[in-house]
Image (tube, coloured by chain):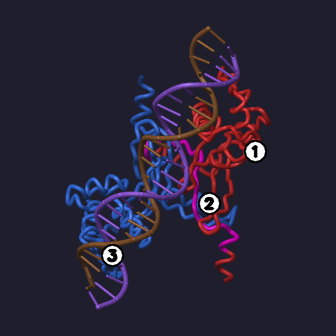
Chain colours: A blue, B red, C brown, D purple
DNA sequence: CTGCATGCAAACCTTTTGCAAGACT
DNA sequence: AGTCTTGCAAAAGGTTTGCATGCAG
Protein backbone atom coordinates (compact mmCIF):
# COMPACT_ATOMS: atom_id res chain seq x y z
CA UNK A 1 0.00 0.00 0.00
CA UNK A 2 2.80 2.37 0.81
CA UNK A 3 4.06 3.91 -2.35
CA UNK A 4 7.40 5.00 -0.95
CA UNK A 5 9.37 8.15 -1.60
CA UNK A 6 8.24 10.37 -4.37
CA UNK A 7 4.78 8.92 -4.47
CA UNK A 8 3.15 12.31 -4.17
CA UNK A 9 5.13 13.71 -7.06
CA UNK A 10 4.14 10.78 -9.22
CA UNK A 11 0.54 11.05 -8.16
CA UNK A 12 0.52 14.69 -9.16
CA UNK A 13 2.21 14.08 -12.47
CA UNK A 14 -0.20 11.29 -13.22
CA UNK A 15 -3.00 13.77 -12.91
CA UNK A 16 -1.28 16.32 -15.05
CA UNK A 17 -0.79 18.77 -12.22
CA UNK A 18 2.26 20.93 -12.01
CA UNK A 19 5.10 19.80 -9.88
CA UNK A 20 6.78 22.98 -8.74
CA UNK A 21 9.89 23.03 -6.56
CA UNK A 22 7.79 24.27 -3.66
CA UNK A 23 5.41 21.37 -4.00
CA UNK A 24 8.28 18.93 -4.26
CA UNK A 25 9.77 20.30 -1.07
CA UNK A 26 6.43 20.18 0.69
CA UNK A 27 5.85 16.63 -0.44
CA UNK A 28 9.28 15.72 0.81
CA UNK A 29 8.48 17.23 4.17
CA UNK A 30 5.21 15.36 4.45
CA UNK A 31 6.85 12.12 3.50
CA UNK A 32 9.74 12.71 5.86
CA UNK A 33 7.61 13.68 8.84
CA UNK A 34 5.27 10.79 8.10
CA UNK A 35 2.49 10.83 10.58
CA UNK A 36 -0.10 13.31 11.66
CA UNK A 37 1.43 16.69 11.30
CA UNK A 38 0.28 20.26 11.34
CA UNK A 39 0.72 22.80 8.59
CA UNK A 40 3.15 24.59 10.85
CA UNK A 41 5.28 21.49 11.29
CA UNK A 42 5.38 20.96 7.57
CA UNK A 43 6.27 24.59 7.14
CA UNK A 44 9.17 24.35 9.57
CA UNK A 45 10.50 21.28 7.85
CA UNK A 46 10.14 22.98 4.50
CA UNK A 47 11.98 26.02 5.79
CA UNK A 48 15.00 23.90 6.52
CA UNK A 49 15.19 22.97 2.89
CA UNK A 50 14.29 26.34 1.46
CA UNK A 51 13.40 29.29 3.66
CA UNK A 52 11.70 31.13 0.83
CA UNK A 53 8.70 28.84 0.64
CA UNK A 54 5.72 30.51 2.23
CA UNK A 55 3.20 29.19 4.68
CA UNK A 56 0.43 30.14 2.27
CA UNK A 57 1.89 27.75 -0.26
CA UNK A 58 1.98 25.01 2.31
CA UNK A 59 -1.70 25.52 2.94
CA UNK A 60 -2.49 25.70 -0.74
CA UNK A 61 -0.59 22.53 -1.38
CA UNK A 62 -2.35 20.75 1.44
CA UNK A 63 -5.65 21.86 -0.02
CA UNK A 64 -4.61 20.41 -3.34
CA UNK A 65 -3.61 17.12 -1.80
CA UNK A 66 -6.93 16.96 -0.01
CA UNK A 67 -8.78 17.50 -3.26
CA UNK A 68 -6.76 14.77 -4.90
CA UNK A 69 -7.57 12.58 -1.95
CA UNK A 70 -3.92 11.88 -1.26
CA UNK A 71 -3.96 13.02 2.33
CA UNK A 72 -6.56 13.32 5.00
CA UNK A 73 -7.25 15.90 7.60
CA UNK A 74 -8.19 15.43 11.22
CA UNK A 75 -8.08 17.55 14.28
CA UNK A 76 -7.55 15.56 17.39
CA UNK A 77 -9.88 17.78 19.35
CA UNK A 78 -7.33 20.53 19.04
CA UNK A 79 -7.45 23.86 17.33
CA UNK A 80 -5.13 23.14 14.45
CA UNK A 81 -5.62 20.63 11.69
CA UNK A 82 -3.49 17.53 11.38
CA UNK A 83 -2.65 16.00 8.04
CA UNK A 84 -1.49 12.55 7.08
CA UNK A 85 -0.68 10.65 3.94
CA UNK A 86 -3.35 8.21 2.85
CA UNK A 87 -0.85 5.51 2.12
CA UNK A 88 -1.55 2.93 4.71
CA UNK A 89 -5.11 1.81 4.65
CA UNK A 90 -8.06 3.04 6.66
CA UNK A 91 -7.22 3.49 10.28
CA UNK A 92 -8.13 5.47 13.36
CA UNK A 93 -6.45 6.90 16.39
CA UNK A 94 -6.37 6.50 20.08
CA UNK A 95 -5.51 9.82 21.63
CA UNK A 96 -4.43 9.81 25.25
CA UNK A 97 -6.00 12.68 27.14
CA UNK A 98 -3.25 12.53 29.73
CA UNK A 99 -0.05 12.57 27.73
CA UNK A 100 -1.21 13.28 24.20
CA UNK A 101 0.20 10.01 22.93
CA UNK A 102 -1.37 8.91 19.68
CA UNK A 103 -1.62 5.31 18.55
CA UNK A 104 -3.15 3.89 15.42
CA UNK A 105 -5.57 1.06 15.14
CA UNK A 106 -7.16 -0.61 12.20
CA UNK A 107 -10.53 0.22 10.75
CA UNK A 108 -11.66 -3.37 10.85
CA UNK A 109 -12.57 -2.98 14.47
CA UNK A 110 -15.44 -0.79 13.34
CA UNK A 111 -17.02 -3.31 11.05
CA UNK A 112 -19.76 -4.24 13.53
CA UNK A 113 -20.50 -0.57 14.17
CA UNK A 114 -20.76 0.15 10.48
CA UNK A 115 -23.14 -2.71 9.96
CA UNK A 116 -25.27 -1.61 12.88
CA UNK A 117 -25.53 1.98 11.67
CA UNK A 118 -26.48 0.78 8.25
CA UNK A 119 -29.23 -1.43 9.57
CA UNK A 120 -30.59 0.88 12.22
CA UNK A 121 -30.32 4.26 10.54
CA UNK A 122 -29.74 3.60 6.89
CA UNK A 123 -26.55 5.57 7.39
CA UNK A 124 -23.57 4.79 5.24
CA UNK A 125 -20.70 5.52 7.58
CA UNK A 126 -17.36 6.57 6.25
CA UNK A 127 -15.33 5.70 9.27
CA UNK A 128 -12.26 7.22 7.82
CA UNK A 129 -10.26 8.72 10.51
CA UNK A 130 -11.80 8.75 13.92
CA UNK A 131 -10.06 9.95 17.02
CA UNK A 132 -10.99 8.13 20.16
CA UNK A 133 -9.96 9.78 23.37
CA UNK A 134 -9.10 7.99 26.55
CA UNK A 135 -6.23 6.95 28.75
CA UNK A 136 -3.34 5.01 27.29
CA UNK A 137 -1.78 1.98 28.83
CA UNK A 138 1.22 3.84 30.18
CA UNK A 139 -0.81 6.55 31.85
CA UNK A 140 -3.23 4.07 33.34
CA UNK A 141 -0.34 2.30 34.98
CA UNK A 142 1.11 5.57 36.17
CA UNK A 143 -2.23 6.71 37.53
CA UNK A 144 -2.88 3.40 39.20
CA UNK A 145 0.58 3.19 40.68
CA UNK A 146 0.84 6.63 42.16
CA UNK B 1 -31.06 11.93 33.62
CA UNK B 2 -32.34 15.27 32.41
CA UNK B 3 -32.28 17.71 35.26
CA UNK B 4 -34.69 20.16 33.70
CA UNK B 5 -34.67 23.92 33.87
CA UNK B 6 -32.27 25.58 36.23
CA UNK B 7 -30.05 22.57 36.54
CA UNK B 8 -26.96 24.52 35.60
CA UNK B 9 -27.63 27.18 38.19
CA UNK B 10 -28.07 24.56 40.87
CA UNK B 11 -24.96 22.74 39.75
CA UNK B 12 -22.98 25.94 40.05
CA UNK B 13 -24.37 26.84 43.43
CA UNK B 14 -23.67 23.36 44.68
CA UNK B 15 -20.03 23.94 43.87
CA UNK B 16 -19.95 27.31 45.51
CA UNK B 17 -19.43 29.19 42.27
CA UNK B 18 -20.95 32.57 41.73
CA UNK B 19 -24.20 32.77 39.87
CA UNK B 20 -24.18 36.11 38.16
CA UNK B 21 -27.03 37.41 36.02
CA UNK B 22 -24.91 36.88 32.93
CA UNK B 23 -24.32 33.27 33.79
CA UNK B 24 -27.98 32.73 34.50
CA UNK B 25 -28.87 34.16 31.11
CA UNK B 26 -26.26 32.06 29.38
CA UNK B 27 -27.44 28.93 31.15
CA UNK B 28 -30.96 29.73 30.11
CA UNK B 29 -29.84 30.07 26.52
CA UNK B 30 -28.01 26.75 26.57
CA UNK B 31 -30.99 25.02 28.10
CA UNK B 32 -33.38 26.63 25.69
CA UNK B 33 -31.35 25.88 22.57
CA UNK B 34 -30.75 22.34 23.79
CA UNK B 35 -28.60 20.57 21.32
CA UNK B 36 -25.23 21.13 19.80
CA UNK B 37 -24.76 24.81 19.55
CA UNK B 38 -21.96 27.20 18.86
CA UNK B 39 -20.78 30.00 21.12
CA UNK B 40 -22.16 32.40 18.57
CA UNK B 41 -25.61 30.85 18.70
CA UNK B 42 -25.61 31.04 22.46
CA UNK B 43 -24.50 34.63 22.20
CA UNK B 44 -27.33 35.52 19.87
CA UNK B 45 -29.87 33.92 22.12
CA UNK B 46 -28.37 35.69 25.12
CA UNK B 47 -28.53 38.99 23.31
CA UNK B 48 -32.26 38.66 22.98
CA UNK B 49 -32.54 38.55 26.74
CA UNK B 50 -29.92 41.16 27.50
CA UNK B 51 -27.87 42.80 24.78
CA UNK B 52 -25.20 43.92 27.23
CA UNK B 53 -23.79 40.48 27.84
CA UNK B 54 -20.55 40.11 25.95
CA UNK B 55 -19.29 37.30 23.77
CA UNK B 56 -16.21 37.06 25.97
CA UNK B 57 -18.42 36.21 28.90
CA UNK B 58 -20.15 33.54 26.88
CA UNK B 59 -16.78 31.98 26.16
CA UNK B 60 -15.64 32.29 29.75
CA UNK B 61 -18.84 30.71 30.97
CA UNK B 62 -18.52 27.86 28.51
CA UNK B 63 -14.99 27.30 29.72
CA UNK B 64 -16.28 27.16 33.26
CA UNK B 65 -18.97 24.67 32.35
CA UNK B 66 -16.39 22.53 30.61
CA UNK B 67 -14.21 22.53 33.69
CA UNK B 68 -17.17 21.55 35.81
CA UNK B 69 -17.90 18.83 33.30
CA UNK B 70 -21.45 20.02 32.77
CA UNK B 71 -21.18 20.39 29.03
CA UNK B 72 -19.06 18.87 26.36
CA UNK B 73 -17.38 20.27 23.34
CA UNK B 74 -17.17 18.79 19.87
CA UNK B 75 -16.45 20.12 16.46
CA UNK B 76 -18.17 18.23 13.73
CA UNK B 77 -15.18 18.56 11.47
CA UNK B 78 -15.88 22.25 11.25
CA UNK B 79 -13.93 25.25 12.38
CA UNK B 80 -16.07 26.31 15.27
CA UNK B 81 -16.72 24.42 18.46
CA UNK B 82 -20.11 22.98 19.32
CA UNK B 83 -21.29 22.65 22.87
CA UNK B 84 -23.98 20.51 24.45
CA UNK B 85 -25.36 19.83 27.86
CA UNK B 86 -24.26 16.55 29.33
CA UNK B 87 -27.76 15.71 30.45
CA UNK B 88 -28.82 12.92 28.24
CA UNK B 89 -26.51 10.01 28.48
CA UNK B 90 -23.48 9.19 26.39
CA UNK B 91 -24.20 9.42 22.72
CA UNK B 92 -22.57 10.09 19.38
CA UNK B 93 -23.44 11.66 16.09
CA UNK B 94 -23.89 10.73 12.52
CA UNK B 95 -23.01 13.71 10.39
CA UNK B 96 -24.11 13.62 6.78
CA UNK B 97 -21.40 14.93 4.50
CA UNK B 98 -23.97 15.77 1.86
CA UNK B 99 -26.60 17.78 3.67
CA UNK B 100 -25.09 18.40 7.09
CA UNK B 101 -27.89 16.56 8.83
CA UNK B 102 -26.94 15.38 12.29
CA UNK B 103 -28.51 12.42 14.04
CA UNK B 104 -27.76 10.97 17.43
CA UNK B 105 -27.12 7.39 18.26
CA UNK B 106 -26.49 5.66 21.51
CA UNK B 107 -23.09 4.85 22.92
CA UNK B 108 -23.96 1.23 23.48
CA UNK B 109 -23.18 0.49 19.87
CA UNK B 110 -19.54 1.03 20.74
CA UNK B 111 -19.38 -1.53 23.49
CA UNK B 112 -17.62 -4.13 21.33
CA UNK B 113 -15.13 -1.52 20.13
CA UNK B 114 -14.36 -0.45 23.66
CA UNK B 115 -13.77 -3.99 24.74
CA UNK B 116 -11.52 -4.64 21.81
CA UNK B 117 -9.41 -1.55 22.40
CA UNK B 118 -9.05 -2.47 26.01
CA UNK B 119 -7.89 -5.96 25.21
CA UNK B 120 -5.65 -5.16 22.30
CA UNK B 121 -4.08 -1.90 23.37
CA UNK B 122 -4.75 -1.54 27.07
CA UNK B 123 -6.49 1.67 26.09
CA UNK B 124 -9.35 2.89 28.20
CA UNK B 125 -11.55 4.58 25.63
CA UNK B 126 -13.81 7.42 26.61
CA UNK B 127 -16.12 7.22 23.67
CA UNK B 128 -17.88 10.35 24.72
CA UNK B 129 -18.92 12.22 21.73
CA UNK B 130 -17.79 10.87 18.42
CA UNK B 131 -18.82 12.24 15.11
CA UNK B 132 -19.12 9.72 12.35
CA UNK B 133 -19.31 11.09 8.88
CA UNK B 134 -21.09 9.50 6.00
CA UNK B 135 -24.20 9.72 3.89
CA UNK B 136 -27.60 9.80 5.53
CA UNK B 137 -30.58 7.77 4.41
CA UNK B 138 -32.26 10.68 2.66
CA UNK B 139 -29.22 11.63 0.66
CA UNK B 140 -28.50 8.06 -0.30
CA UNK B 141 -31.96 7.76 -1.76
CA UNK B 142 -31.60 11.06 -3.53
CA UNK B 143 -28.20 10.10 -4.93
CA UNK B 144 -29.43 6.69 -5.98
CA UNK B 145 -32.59 8.06 -7.57
CA UNK B 146 -31.08 10.98 -9.46
C1' DC C 1 -15.71 44.53 52.06
C1' DT C 2 -13.12 41.45 49.07
C1' DG C 3 -12.28 38.80 45.34
C1' DC C 4 -14.22 36.97 41.48
C1' DA C 5 -16.75 38.23 37.15
C1' DT C 6 -17.61 41.46 33.51
C1' DG C 7 -17.19 44.52 29.28
C1' DC C 8 -14.50 46.34 26.04
C1' DA C 9 -11.15 46.16 22.82
C1' DA C 10 -7.13 44.45 21.41
C1' DA C 11 -4.41 40.32 20.78
C1' DC C 12 -4.06 35.81 19.24
C1' DC C 13 -3.81 31.71 16.30
C1' DT C 14 -4.81 29.31 12.37
C1' DT C 15 -6.24 29.53 7.84
C1' DT C 16 -7.65 31.99 3.61
C1' DT C 17 -7.32 35.41 -0.01
C1' DG C 18 -6.11 39.40 -3.51
C1' DC C 19 -2.82 40.76 -6.35
C1' DA C 20 1.21 41.36 -8.96
C1' DA C 21 5.26 38.82 -10.25
C1' DG C 22 7.25 34.50 -11.61
C1' DA C 23 7.70 29.64 -13.18
C1' DC C 24 6.18 25.17 -15.38
C1' DT C 25 4.61 22.56 -19.49
C1' DA D 1 2.98 31.89 -24.61
C1' DG D 2 -0.39 31.06 -21.57
C1' DT D 3 -1.94 29.45 -17.43
C1' DC D 4 -1.13 27.99 -13.14
C1' DT D 5 1.57 28.92 -8.92
C1' DT D 6 3.94 31.80 -5.72
C1' DG D 7 5.05 35.33 -2.09
C1' DC D 8 3.67 38.84 0.48
C1' DA D 9 0.77 40.95 3.42
C1' DA D 10 -3.58 41.76 4.78
C1' DA D 11 -8.09 39.77 6.03
C1' DA D 12 -10.82 36.60 8.07
C1' DG D 13 -12.95 33.67 11.62
C1' DG D 14 -13.02 31.91 16.03
C1' DT D 15 -11.31 32.30 20.58
C1' DT D 16 -8.60 34.29 24.39
C1' DT D 17 -6.78 37.94 27.31
C1' DG D 18 -5.44 42.53 29.95
C1' DC D 19 -7.26 45.82 32.49
C1' DA D 20 -10.21 48.82 34.91
C1' DT D 21 -14.86 48.61 36.75
C1' DG D 22 -18.71 46.32 38.98
C1' DC D 23 -21.20 43.06 41.60
C1' DA D 24 -22.07 38.52 44.27
C1' DG D 25 -21.41 36.47 48.44
Say the numbered circle drawn on residue B48.
Answer: 1
- The answer to whether any part of residue B124 appears in the image is no
Element carrying mark 3:
helix
- Residue D17 versus residue C15: which sits nearer the camera? D17
- Residue B32 versus residue B40: which sits nearer the camera? B40
| Magenta run includes residue B121 | yes
Q: Which residues are magenta?
A: B120-140
Q: Mark 3 falls within which chain?
A: A
Disc nearest the viewer among 1 and 2: 1
- In this picture, residue A121 sits left or right of residue D2: right
Q: CA distance from mark 1 to mark 3?
A: 53 Å
Residue, x 43% and y 45% (percent of image)? Answer: B121
Q: Mark 2 falls within which chain?
A: B
Q: Quadrant of the N terminus of chain B?
A: top right
| Magenta run includes residue A115 | no
Above or below: residue A36 compared with residue A71: above
User: Is label 1 on the same chain as label 3?
Assistant: no
- From the top left corner, tell me how far across and down residue C16 is, in percent: 46, 63
- From the top left corner, tell me how far across and down residue B132 is, in percent: 58, 58
Say the numbered circle drawn on residue B95.
Answer: 2
Give the labeled residue for mark 3: A11
Residue, x 63% and y 58% (percent of image)? Answer: B94
- From the top left corner, tell me how far across and down residue B146 is, in percent: 67, 83
Amino acid sequence: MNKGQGSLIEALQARGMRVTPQRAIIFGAIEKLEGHITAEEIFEQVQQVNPYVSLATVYRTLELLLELNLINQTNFGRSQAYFALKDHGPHHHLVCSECGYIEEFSDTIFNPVRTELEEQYGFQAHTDHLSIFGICKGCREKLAGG
